[in-house]
Image (spheres, rainbow, N blue to C red):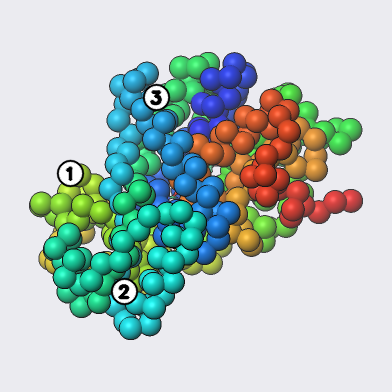
């Protein structure tokens, strides 16, 4: 969020200083699988679905721009997604899923087992069928992060790594800057994009339960040839295949505070789900594993925009969809900073819906 907002603002000639306690991309954003999949993630909520679809289209524009301007390929591929149904009851859920998508104007196909295996032969033949959505995509988060940070610096944004913000300086009901290691840095506006750590920063008037960490463990392997063409969801997990054969398997959702690490139980869960999707992964080598913290919120939507403290803005709480929603978030923050009248999206995502007022 920090890098995306910085790039977008710097392009509008806003002077930007990014303060990062570690290095950009140190946390959730580098851990993400890079699924741009609103049709699976948000089909239950028409508003969230529409937000995700809009942001996914902004990704396409952003990817072209980063390629044209800086020659960086962020790995955006409109590969499509599949959701498998194993049990009878899941077939019914997948039918309802397809109906919800169609009602919201998303084109999708219902595949029989035979059609599924023709399209993706490595899928488990025990699947009774699948839902296919062609419009969803993937991106490579680490490539995206470094490209967006590069773009921001190119546009004049300054990054200070190793700079932990201690608190927000508030005076006369408005933000005046931040405290960083004994130094006060004045600013006309402060945008907090601290992910799961947002509510820990003094000056933010939110309960710890408003943005909370949800640990996700991931595992990477590779296959030759690449095991799937599309992103495959099923059995409570997902498998994302990169064109070079790298395979990312995810993921757990654990409320364990900020406890870092990988657990036997977490890996067992991820492995079990991935093998249920693709039995052939049984023989694939474990290449890497990691975990990080998704910033969860009570209503599943992020907190984006100005708070009750004037000139203090949040870009946080994006839970499972922060990579997807980054370009849209950057647009909304840029609009707020330009004092544009709030759009319907901006109103719905306003942090004020959760804030404690005096
Ligand atoms: C395993 C996993 C898989 C995921 N897969 C996907 C996916 O496929 N698609 C998708 O769209 N989303 C995915 N997500 C979610 C996505 O990664 C997050 O929603 C998104 O990265 C959140 O971005 P952020 O910038 O808010 O937080 P982060 O990336 O966590 O960044 C917050 C930054 O703030 C810094 N910071 C914190 N406190 C301070 C302070 N006091 N001072 C200075 N700096 C501070 C941290 O060092 C950190 O760099 C996944 C998440 C996980 C964990």
Residue placed most toward the observer, 306 or 215: 306
> How far is disc 3 from disc 2 in space, using C-alphas?
38 Å
Disc number at residue 85?
2
Q: Secondary structure at mark 1?
A: loop
The residue lying furthest to the bottom in this view is 88
Q: Earlier in the sequence, mark 3 or mark 1?
A: 3
Give the residue at x 89% y 33%: 172
Residue placed most toward the observer, 174 or 129: 129
Examine the image and state in which quarter residue 262 appears: bottom left
Q: Earlier in the sequence, mark 1 or mark 2?
A: 2
Q: Secondary structure at mark 3?
A: helix
Residue 313 shown left or right of residue 118 in the figure: right
The percent coordinates of residue 73 (x first, y second) are 30, 30
The percent coordinates of residue 316 (x first, y second) are 60, 46
The percent coordinates of residue 59 (x first, y second) are 42, 37
Q: Is residue 276 above or below residue 248?
A: below
The percent coordinates of residue 164 (x first, y second) are 60, 37
Give the residue at x 46% y 54%: 105
Q: Can residue 21 be spotted in the picture? A: no
Q: Can residue 337 be spotted in the picture? A: yes
> How far is disc 1 from disc 2 in space, using C-alphas?
27 Å
Mark 1 within 8 Å of ligand 1, using the beta carbon: no
> What residue did someone put label 1 on?
244
> What residue did someone put label 3 on?
65
């Amino acid at each position: 969020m920090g890098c995306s907002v910085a790039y977008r603002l710097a392009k509008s000639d806003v002077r930007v200083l990014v303060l990062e306690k570690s290095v950009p991309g140190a946390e959730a954003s580098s851990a993400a699988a890079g699924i741009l999949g609103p049709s699976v993630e948000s089909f239950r909520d028409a508003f969230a679905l529409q937000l995700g679809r809009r942001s996914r289209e902004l990704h396409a524009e952003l990817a072209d721009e980063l390629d044209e301007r800086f020659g960086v390929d962020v790995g955006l591929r409109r590969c499509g997604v599949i959701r498998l149904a194993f049990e009878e009851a899941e077939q019914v859920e997948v039918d309802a899923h397809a109906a919800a998508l169609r009602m919201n104007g998303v084109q999708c196909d219902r595949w029989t087992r035979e059609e599924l295996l023709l399209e993706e032969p490595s899928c488990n033949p025990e699947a009774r069928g699948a839902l296919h959505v062609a419009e969803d995509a993937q991106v490579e988060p680490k490539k995206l992060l470094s490209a967006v940070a590069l773009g921001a610096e190119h546009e004049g944004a300054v990054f200070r790594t190793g700079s932990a913000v201690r608190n927000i300086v508030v005076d006369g009901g408005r933000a005046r800057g931040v405290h960083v290691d004994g130094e006060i840095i004045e600013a006309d506006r402060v945008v907090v994009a601290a992910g799961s750590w947002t509510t820990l920063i003094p000056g933010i008037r939110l309960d710890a339960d408003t943005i909370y960490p949800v640990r996700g463990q991931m595992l990477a392997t590779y296959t030759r040839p690449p095991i799937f063409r599309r992103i495959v969801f099923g059995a409570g997990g997902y498998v994302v295949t990169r064109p070079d054969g790298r395979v990312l398997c995810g993921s757990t959702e654990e409320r364990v505070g900020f406890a870092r690490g990988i657990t036997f139980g977490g890996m067992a869960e991820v492995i079990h789900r991935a093998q249920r999707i693709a039995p052939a992964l049984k023989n694939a080598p474990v290449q890497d594993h990691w975990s990080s913290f998704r910033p969860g919120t009570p209503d599943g939507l992020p907190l984006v925009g100005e708070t009750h403290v004037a000139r203090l803005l949040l870009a946080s709480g994006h839970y499972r969809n922060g990579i997807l929603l980054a370009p849209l978030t950057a647009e909304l923050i840029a609009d707020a900073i330009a004092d544009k009248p709030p759009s319907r999206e901006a109103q719905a995502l306003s942090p004020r819906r959760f804030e404690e007022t005096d």
